[in-house]
Image (cartoon, rainbow, N blue to C red):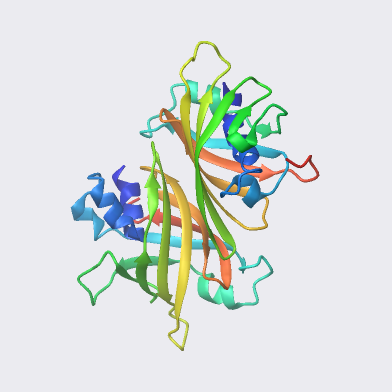
Amino acid sequence: MKKLLCAAASLGAIAYLSSMALADDHSLGTDNETVTFSDLTLADGTPDDGTCAKRYGTGYKTADHPDTSSKEAQKTTSEGHDIIISSTGGTIGDGILSIENEYEIIFPNDEHKETIDVKMFATGLIGSGTASGVFSDGTCRGKVTIQSAQQ
Amino acid sequence: MKTALCTAVSLTALALTSISVDAMSLRLGHGDKSTTFSDLSLVNGSPDNGICARRYADDFTVKKHPNSLAEQRSFTTYEGHEIKMPHVSGSLETGLYSVENEYIITFPDTTQINPVRFQLMATGTIGETQSTGVCSDATYRGLIAMTLMKKTQLQ
């Protein structure tokens, strides 16, 4: 149970999970995950013009942000992303969970350092360490899979 | 028993046709829906004791039933299930949707009198014919995929 909770927590569902008294405080801020994207298209479903592959063609592995004490709200990645978890939500059911998060991401290959708002819906089995779903930034959309780094 | 589930999910489909809130038919489209389950286990992740597979192992296709009262979120299946849908919710973003529905299912099997509460959480991209997610009846859980079948009767 801890692993998926950790995954959800690092995704930004921290406040929610902590309040459930299910989460391990020690692991919440330090857990990170591997995020991969697939089925990339423009947001209306038409083929990618290159923008989406540039942003999401490679996934990333999150790491604690070096410049903040609020590790759970801000992340960096081994690929150089800068990520703020701007909004979180979700549901814990009987053995299942859903996550609705919003992120502000600066991609490492964007010379303008533009902040992109990314919305994600995902679901998972508690304890599996994996959640999968969909994401959109208003321009691009696709499938997303989050794997707990503890797996 | 397995059909019970199917019903539940199909209801996802059915139910949603006439209510204005977020519904699977609204998101996935109107028509028969093929539903499959995988990774079935007890809710705590322990291996299935066999009942789980009996309920959900087989694929099924959800179809509209003439006695269903969608406007009351009350559904009858061809297998005899009685299903109510006390809670529907979901979100919509650019090109995406999520659905979180809850069903109360009474199985036609007389050995199981008590209704079962069935939760469904699923996501998808708008315009595509498949939605995937997770489901749980508080005893068993698993992954679920619903696929809209083309050229079937509108529901």
**What residue lies at 66% left-to-right and 65% top-to-bottom?**
A45
Q: Residue furthest toward the right?
A: B151
Q: Residue furthest toward the bottom?
A: A112
Quadrant assignment for the N terminus of chain B: top right
A16 or B52: nearer the viewer: A16
Residue A85 x/y as whole percent: 35, 67
Residue A103 position by quadrant: bottom left
Residue A78 position by quadrant: bottom left
Looking at the image, residue B117 lies above or below residue A48: above
**What residue lies at 57% left-to-right and 32% top-to-bottom?**
B8
In this image, B62 relative to A86: left or right? Answer: right
Residue A19 x/y as whole percent: 24, 49
Residue B128 x/y as whole percent: 67, 55
In this image, A58 relative to A105: left or right? Answer: right
B52 or A78: nearer the viewer: B52
A41 or A88: nearer the viewer: A88
Residue A124 x/y as whole percent: 44, 46
Residue A77 visible (yes or no):
no
Residue B12 position by quadrant: top right
Quadrant assignment for the C terminus of chain B: top right
In this image, B64 relative to A112: left or right? Answer: right
